[in-house]
Image (cartoon, grey):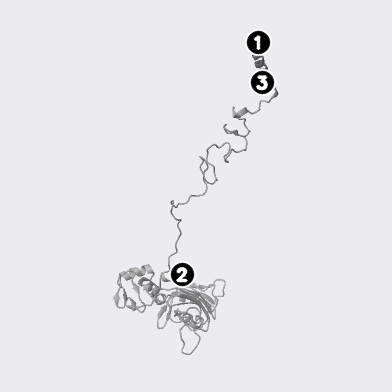
Amino acid sequence: MNNRRQSNNRNSQGGNNRGRGANNGSSSSRPNGGKGKPSFGAKKTEGSKPSFGGGSRTEGGKPSFGGNKPSYGGGRPTGEGKSFGPKKSFSKPGEKPFVKRLKAAPVDDGTIRLNKYVANAGIASRREADELIKTGIVTVNGEVITEMGYKVQEGDEVRFDGKKISSQKNVYFLLNKPKGFISTAKDEKNRQTVMDLMSTATTARIFPVGRLDRQTTGVLLFTNDGYLTKKLTHPSHDIKKIYHVTLDKKLTANDMADIKKGVRLIPEGIAVVDTISYIENRPKNEIGLEIHIGWNRVVRRIFEKLGYKVEALDRVSFAGLTKKTIGRGEYRALTELEVNFLKMM
């Protein structure tokens, strides 16, 4: 009986102690031993749910509010989370990584494909040459060749439509011709020729396309492309040429009207001028003239027929090519675009 009373006393004392502890402590005190719910804003305790306020992170670097969601911008995946980092290699396990290998340079055996041979002769592009070869118009050493990929040996004679052709690479130059030079390869009187101006341009054997007389200046084309030369100089192609003409006196309106109608020259006939006009902001004795006929000294003869003397004659354009950026007596190589343009005319 006495024992039970002593036990009750101890229990009541313990209750009183707990009550005093509750009164002395704060209501925000953390639970013991990880039991109970975590306080908001405190660190996450082991085994509890993540807190939503603090900036601290749990072990492993995951955010306290992220759980098992993927991390963005991290490296490789960790735990159960996914990663959006570096790409994986596409090589299969055990395979060596792909390494690009350089192709060996082709061996030059001295031969040349027939379509390239025809193209180098200036007749057509390689693709067009293939079509021409199929028609049987090309012969090698007297034998018709229609085989694609046929190779021409050094010393073979190649003919296109019965005419012998050469595979020498074609070159194209534009000269701004000065006065005092003759437009021929050689001169019997040993006078200066345009070839003297082009002596350092190339080792290929080039020739002027058309002619300018000794006192005429301006655009003059040079090439070893015989096919293009014939095309640009044949009257049927109507290649346009523009001249800047300076006369000894003003050109009257009546005479300009007569030139537009056409001036008869002997022995050729009527010289047709495509366009003629005064040059803007210049005196009336300076004339711009466009013409396609290629008669000898035709521009000078037109004005002389009407009583004018040509004091200066400058060709500023030929087949769309101009002498811009080229000083007098200087030359430049044509661009690939310019060459293609000429071949399409």
Which numbered dot is residue 18?
3
Three-letter residue code for mark 3: Arg
- Residue 295 image point, x, y percent: 43, 80
The residue under label 2 is: 336
- Residue 52 image point, x, y percent: 60, 34
The residue under label 1 is: 2
Contact, mark 1 vs mark 3 (Cβ under 8 Å): no
Three-letter residue code for mark 2: Glu
Residue at image x 68%, y 20%? Answer: 17
Number of numbered discs visible in the structure rendering: 3
Residue at image x 65%, y 16%? Answer: 11
Q: Nearer the viewer, residue 144 or 257?
A: 144
* Comparing labels 2 and 1, the label whose residue is closer to the camera: 1
Three-letter residue code for mark 1: Asn
Sequence-first tag of 1 and 3: 1
The answer to whether residue 345 of the structure is visible from this angle is no
The answer to whether residue 139 of the structure is visible from this angle is yes
Sequence-first tag of 3 and 2: 3
Residue pushed farthest top?
Answer: 1
* Comparing labels 3 and 2, the label whose residue is closer to the camera: 3
- Residue 226 image point, x, y percent: 40, 77
- Residue 15 image point, x, y percent: 66, 18
Q: In the displayed structure, would residue 329 be above or below residue 24?
A: below
Q: CA distance from mark 3 to mark 2?
A: 101 Å
Seen in the image, is 137 located left or right of residue 278? left
Which numbered dot is residue 19?
none
Name the image quarter holding the N terminus.
top right
Q: CA distance from mark 1 to mark 3?
A: 25 Å
The secondary structure type at the circle numbered 2 is helix
Sequence-first tag of 2 and 1: 1
